[in-house]
Image: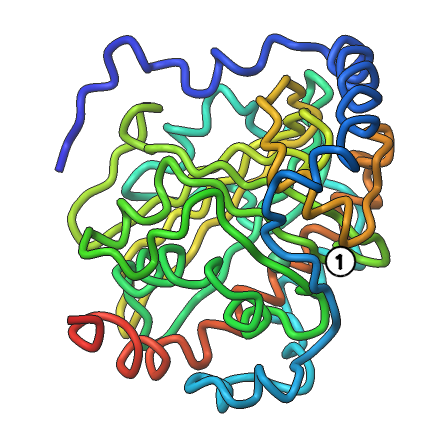
Amino acid sequence: MRVPTGKYSQPMSRHASVTRRAALSVGVLIVGTVAAGLRASAARAQPASTARYRGYSPEDWARPYAKFMADRTLPPTPSVAAAYTGPPTPAEGIPEASTLHTELAATDYSPIETGYGRTSSGKVWVAVHTEMPGVTAAMWDWWFGWHSAESARYKLWHPDAHLYAGLAVDKSAESISDRAKYIGNVSYVDEYIGPKLQQLAIAFQDPLAHGFEVPDGHTMILARVGSAVAPLNVGWLAHQVRPIAGGCEMRSRFYLDMWGIRLPDIRNAVAAVERGPSLDPRDIATDMEAARELLLHCGQEMHHLARFLPDLYNEFGGDAQL
Ligand SMILES: [Zn+2]
């Protein structure tokens, strides 16, 4: 379906005006307040979960989908491996975040589909292209509506790096569309990006409201990325899924250093602290090393999940949900 861009023709611009320094200044103040109140709040709030561990517990192995859990994440594709070991993309080859809705148009490709670097305006940028035989966009919508409800589901995606997942509101079992389960919802995850453990809040957005075109048979997973503990947003992510011969392709984009303030979720902040937090928002690195590691992480998890997503979906998604 085609959607007029209208007043949303400058995607994400409403959230991009806060500088890193301002965000950190406010964030440090709020974090101090939140941290001081967390222990008291913990007595009243019901923590989402304090369980964080690598791999599967005996209880996890008893789950019906456990046969899809691998010992290790698959190696990245050759194009991702080459980009990871190569230099950053020069700024003149990197589109600014404000053009993302045209870069991720329904057709055509960008000159560079896999790489990392910094835009001319100083934002960190990561792009990853993943081909997925036998996979459809509907499977990805189902995955995003399903996986965050249990950490054991989330771990299927990247066994090496994923440790915890929870939701602001668990809609995974509701009789609504897969997109309605995740758009407008927030996923709280603990995952290693390279050597560094991150506690992130992934706030999924409606791509149509940000000017993206999403034809039938495609999907666009769009989210604001922030800290699960500090009330800070750090960037944006977008995963466009388009059909190709024999399956689909995913065009992933990340823009970091796009700071903003997010409303804290005390219940999930409490749970994140109980799991072992990084309370200092300055801990959220947005340098070139972080960009490289994010490129590798994304390339690995998308390639890894795509190998068994059709079988997982056939067993637990689609008609199997009815
Ligand atoms: Zn991940």
Residue 81 lies left or right of residue 188; in this view the side is: right
Residue at horizontal 48 percent and vertical 11 percent from the top: 14
Quadrant of the image containing the N terminus? top left
Residue at horizontal 46 percent and vertical 60 percent from the top: 149
Quadrant of the image containing the C terminus? bottom left
Q: Which residue is mark 1?
A: 192
Residue 150 lies left or right of residue 229; in this view the side is: left
Give above or below for 291 relative to 171: above
Front in this rendered view, residue 276 or 235:
276
Front in this rendered view, residue 243 or 231:
231
Q: Evaluate whether residue 298 shows in this view.
A: no
Q: Amino acid at mark 1?
A: Tyr
Give above or below for 24 relative to 299: above
Residue at horizontal 86 percent and vertical 28 percent from the top: 282
Q: Evaluate whether residue 92 shows in this view.
A: yes
Q: Secondary structure at mark 1?
A: strand
Q: Position of residue 91 (x, y in %)?
A: 70, 28
Q: Quadrant of ligand 1?
A: bottom right
Residue 222 lies left or right of residue 105; in this view the side is: right
Residue at horizontal 69 percent and vertical 16 percent from the top: 121
- The image quadrant that residue 201 belongs to is top right
Q: 10 Å neighbourhood of mark 1: few (<14), some, or many (≥20)? A: some
